Structures are given as C-alpha cells and as structure tokens.
Image: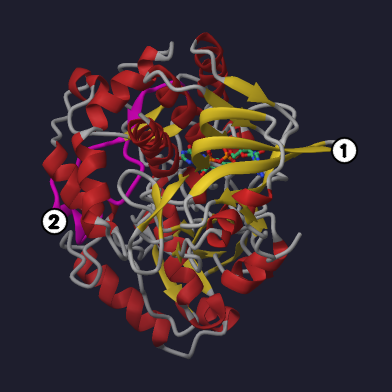
C-alpha cells in the first residue's frame, strides 16, 4: 500500500496495443457498472477492467439505500409529496461545500434515474417504514435516511423521505442485487469484462489527454487504447498510508468498512494525469444509538456537561459532532422512563445512577454542569420546547425520572465504523478537473473515485453514495461516448 502516484505513460512509448475500445472503465462496482452499461447502450465498444475475480467491490457490501426523490413512484404510492426543487434545497443546505450544478442535475434527473434502476430488473417495494432507524428492517421501499426533519434543515426545505432500499431484507449486501443485474445488462449489451485485471497506469498524449490505460493480469501486462477512460475503482479506506495522510483520526480507532481494493489507486491515477482532489479529509463515521428512537428523547452531552447537537440528527451527523468535542468524548443520558436497549449495542451503557450528582461525578463532568443542562432541558421539554437545539417535537420529553443511565459515545469506547468520502474533483459530467477547473480530455472519475454528492460526514444521508455513484456513473458513460463520436 502506498501514497505513490503512478507514472503516466507517454503514448509514443507504446509499441504494441493489446486492444482498442471507445471507452475503458476501471472497476466494476455500482459506478463503473453504470458507466459501462450506459456507454454501451449508446453504441460504444466498452471494456471493463475489474481487479477482483468478481464484480461488486464495496457496493456488494452495501445495505442498498439509494437516495432518490422529486416524486419517485414509491414516494407517490406512499403519499409523500416531493419535488426536485425541495430535494435541491435540502442537498444544498446540508452540504459543507455544495456543488450546485451537480446537485441540480441529480435532483432534476432523480425520477428518471429511479425508473432506470428499476428497469435493470427489480422493483423498489411501494411501502414506507415510518420509524427512525438506520435502515428498514424488512423490504419496505422508503424511509427517512438523512436530516430532512432535523433543525435547521426542516425549515430550509420541505421534508420528504428519500431513502429507497432495494427489496432485500437486512442491513448489508442488498446492493449486491443491483450488481448482479448490472453484470447481466453489461453482458447483454456486449460490454467486455476482464476480471482479475487491474488498471495500473494512464497513457497520455503530448497534450496531456488520456488515450489509454495500462493493465496487469497475473504475470501479464498490456496497453489498451481508448478514447475515454472512466476511473471507478473505489475509495481509499483500506490504504493505511493514504488514510494517515488525509484522515488521520479515521486511522485511530474506528473500524474501517470496505474491500481489499479500496486502496485509492483510482484516485492516484487521476492525480497522475493532473487531476486534483476534494474533501480528502472527510469521512462517513458512525456509531448509531438508535433504534429504538425513544433513546433520542435523552440528551447528548460532552465532558463539560453541555449539549452540542440535536439528538434526533441522522446518526452520522451526531457522530461527526461527537468527534469534534474535547477528547471526542460524549454521553447519551436517558432517564428510567425512556431507557431501552439499543438495537445495535455499539455505545456501551456505562451504568445507572440514582441521582444526577452521582452520575456527574462518575462521568467526571464538572460539578453542577450536568444538573444545570438537564434542568434547563427538562424545564423547556415540559412545555414541548427545545429552544437550544430545536429537537423534533416527538423527541422532546423531560428526562426527570431517575435513576438515569448513560451510554458512552466516546471515540474508543463506542464502536465507530466508517469509510472515506474524498475523491477526484469532477465536473457534473464526471470529467476529472485540473486545479484551474479545466477538464482533462478523455478522463472521468465516478463513485468513490470522485464526484459523488456525499462529500462530508455531517451532510451525509444514507443512499447518497449508491444514488449519486450510479447517477454520475451513467452521465460519465454518456459523456464519454458523445466525446468519442
Ligand atoms: C457496509 C457498508 C454499507 C453501505 N451501505 C450503503 C448504502 O446503503 N447506500 C449508499 O449509498 N452507500 C452505502 N455504502 C457506501 C457505498 O457502498 C460505496 O460508497 C459505493 O458502493 C462505492 O461504489 P464504487 O462503485 O465507487 O466502488 P466499489 O463498489 O468499491 O467498486 C470499485 C471496484 O473497483 C475495483 N478496482 C479497484 N482497483 C482497481 C483497478 N486498479 N483496476 C480495476 N478495478 C479496480 C474493485 O475491485 C471494485 O470492484 C456502504 C458501505 C459499506 C462499507
């Protein structure tokens, strides 16, 4: 593993090409699969190089949330009004550094993309899961998977549920179904897929345009000429050196989620041709304390006994705020009326105490600080109000019935898991951009290699990676073909 940028190969040094294609895609996860299929459907000759023995990558691990809206068939069937405009407002409001052109394209194209996904050969169930949860427990097609109902976002855009889940029960591997269907579609469209074959270097002409790719398969190597190369080789969470360089806190304690080839090579290939990166310091990291959502009636405090986040936030938003607290330490305090066992016991229950003073002392919170925070919260909650963090009304309930319990959200105590979000800077068509914003001719990056909408931990909503990875994968595939013809 390394942070090394592969060398680019000058086209005039290539003495023999193994093949020639219109479009070469590196990586058969959701983004690469969608790019290849869309390019082939537009008439291109497409080669898909996949370093592993099977398609799927990290996508095959994913639960299967696609963040889609603007009036999809599931939203309509379950009575949830939505529009591209409200979706645009939400995604803009929640992002740290929004990219308006991409968000606009994504929201305007979301219903068509939903239909396209279903046309691969599955149907999102026309049903809605109303609870606040990490993922639907069954095959329900729709639920809230972001901060749409959380203040201040609920005032900035009309809330609507947009977390569409593929009809596979359970919290992992649902998206493998979509990969299976993409493999079939790619075969039907004549995409040539070479497994156990990795892209190793980009081939460039004298103007810096990408005109091919070098590959490696067991002991063999070769060079393919292509009008366009699409990098879709996944994130970098499994590359310890890249993580240490860009997201050192992710290397400290969280458990990292991904597959072997999430080694950032795709991103480094993009850099080798003159591309630049964005949001490399950002990660999705989480240790959800819900379900049950009843626990969110409690308060989350830091070591000073102060609240710092609306407790009903999407779990990764809460986690991102926890990690910013001194010592990355925080506790969820719940009284006996609202205490329940979390479904995923990731944040350990420290203990229960008869008095707030005993709890304060046990948690090492300055004397009186937790008492005062709890008193203020309870006083307002008794009137159904939360003037400090504007928690949603259903979660505003006094925590005044001792004994009290505390769950430990502190990094190193709670089991955090995560993956990286940064990647190559791309245009709304997936073209890899240079520092000055100009596109590198013939080079695209999609999915975790660059260009998804999910680019910061606080703004993440479940489904934005698969949703925008597939959406911008398709756009890159189409653009690559239009450029070639
Ligand atoms: C447990 C888990 C659950 C998740 N759940 C969701 C969810 O429900 N919704 C959501 O939106 N996101 C979810 N995510 C995130 C999401 O799965 C990923 O961000 C997304 O799948 C990345 O897709 P991709 O196509 O960019 O990369 P991948 O799916 O990782 O595909 C990249 C492919 O490239 C191949 N490759 C690597 N290097 C090379 C090379 N040099 N040459 C050729 N091929 C190469 C790899 O082998 C791999 O097959 C989840 C992640 C995890 C870990």
Q: Nearer the viewer, residue 176 or 332?
A: 176
Choose the circle earlier in sequence order: 2 or 1.
2
According to the image, what is the colour scheme of the structure? Answer: secondary structure
Residue 156's label in the rendered image is 2
Which residue: 39% across, 81% down?
A: 371
Q: Is residue 154 magenta?
A: yes
Residue 227's label in the rendered image is none
Q: Nearer the viewer, residue 208 or 364?
A: 208
Callout 1: few (<14), some (14-19), or many (20+) C-alpha neighbours within 10 Å?
few
Picture quarter containing residue 352? Answer: bottom right
| Range of residues picked out in magenta | 138-162
Picture quarter containing residue 252? Answer: bottom right
Which residue: 85% across, 36% down?
A: 218
Which residue: 25% across, 32% down?
A: 110
Callout 2: few (<14), some (14-19), or many (20+) C-alpha neighbours within 10 Å?
some
| Residue 412 shows in the view | no
Pointer 1: what residue? 219
Q: Is residue 396 magenta?
A: no
For the C terminus, which image quadrant?
Answer: top left
* Residue 427 shown left or right of residue 266 in the figure: left
Position above or below: 242 against 77: below
Picture quarter containing residue 241? Answer: bottom right
Position above or below: 95 against 227: below
Kindly tell me whether mark 1's CB lies below 8 Å from ligand 1.
Answer: no
Q: Nearer the viewer, residue 22 or 447?
A: 22
Q: Mark 2 falls on what kind of element?
A: helix
Which residue: 87% across, 38% down?
A: 219
Q: Mark 1 falls on what kind of element?
A: loop
């Amino acid at each position: 593993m390394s942070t090394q940028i592969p060398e680019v190969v000058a086209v005039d040094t290539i003495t023999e090409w193994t093949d020639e294609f219109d479009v070469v895609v590196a990586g058969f996860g959701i983004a690469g699969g969608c790019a290849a299929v869309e390019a082939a459907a537009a008439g291109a000759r497409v080669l898909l190089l996949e370093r592993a023995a099977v398609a799927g990558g990290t996508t095959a691990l994913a639960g299967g949330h696609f963040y889609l809206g603007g009036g999809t068939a599931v939203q309509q069937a379950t009575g949830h009004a939505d529009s591209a405009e409200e979706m645009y407002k939400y995604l803009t409001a929640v992002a740290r550094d929004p990219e308006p052109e991409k968000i606009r394209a994504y929201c305007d194209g979301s219903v068509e993309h939903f239909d396209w996904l279903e046309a691969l050969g599955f149907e999102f169930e026309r049903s809605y899961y109303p609870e606040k949860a990490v993922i639907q427990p069954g095959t329900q097609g729709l639920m809230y998977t972001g901060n749409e109902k959380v203040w201040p976002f609920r005032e900035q855009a009309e809330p609507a549920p947009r977390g569409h889940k593929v009809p596979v029960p359970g919290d992992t591997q649902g998206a493998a179904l979509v990969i299976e269907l993409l493999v079939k579609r790619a075969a039907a469209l004549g995409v040539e897929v070479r497994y156990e074959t990795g892209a190793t270097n980009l081939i460039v002409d004298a103007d810096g345009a990408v005109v091919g790719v070098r590959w490696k398969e067991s002991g063999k190597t070769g060079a393919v000429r292509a009008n366009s190369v699409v990098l879709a080789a996944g994130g970098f969470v499994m590359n310890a050196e890249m993580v240490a360089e860009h997201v050192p806190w992710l290397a400290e304690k969280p458990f990292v989620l991904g597959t072997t080839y999430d080694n950032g090579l795709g991103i480094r290939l993009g850099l080798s041709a003159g591309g630049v990166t964005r949001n490399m310091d950002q990660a999705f990291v989480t240790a959800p304390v819900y379900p049950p959502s009843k626990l969110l009636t409690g308060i989350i405090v830091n070591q000073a006994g102060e609240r710092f986040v609306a407790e009903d936030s999407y779990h990764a938003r809460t986690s991102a705020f926890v990690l910013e607290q001194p010592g990355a330490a925080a506790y969820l305090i719940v009284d006996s009326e609202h205490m329940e066992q979390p479904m995923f016991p990731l944040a350990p229950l420290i203990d229960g105490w008869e008095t707030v003073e005993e709890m304060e002392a046990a948690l090492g919170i300055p004397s009186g600080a937790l008492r005062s925070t709890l008193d203020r919260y309870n006083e307002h909650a008794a009137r159904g109000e939360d003037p400090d963090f504007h928690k949603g009304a259903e979660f505003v309930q006094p925590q005044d019935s001792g004994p009290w319990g505390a769950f430990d959200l502190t990094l190193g105590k709670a089991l955090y898991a995560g993956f990286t979000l940064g990647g190559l800077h791309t245009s709304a068509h997936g073209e890899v951009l240079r520092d000055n914003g100009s596109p590198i001719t013939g080079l695209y990056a999609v999915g975790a290699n660059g260009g998804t909408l999910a680019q910061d931990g606080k703004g993440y909503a479940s489904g934005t990676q698969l949703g925008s990875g597939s959406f911008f994968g398709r756009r890159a595939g189409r653009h690559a073909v239009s450029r070639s013809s």
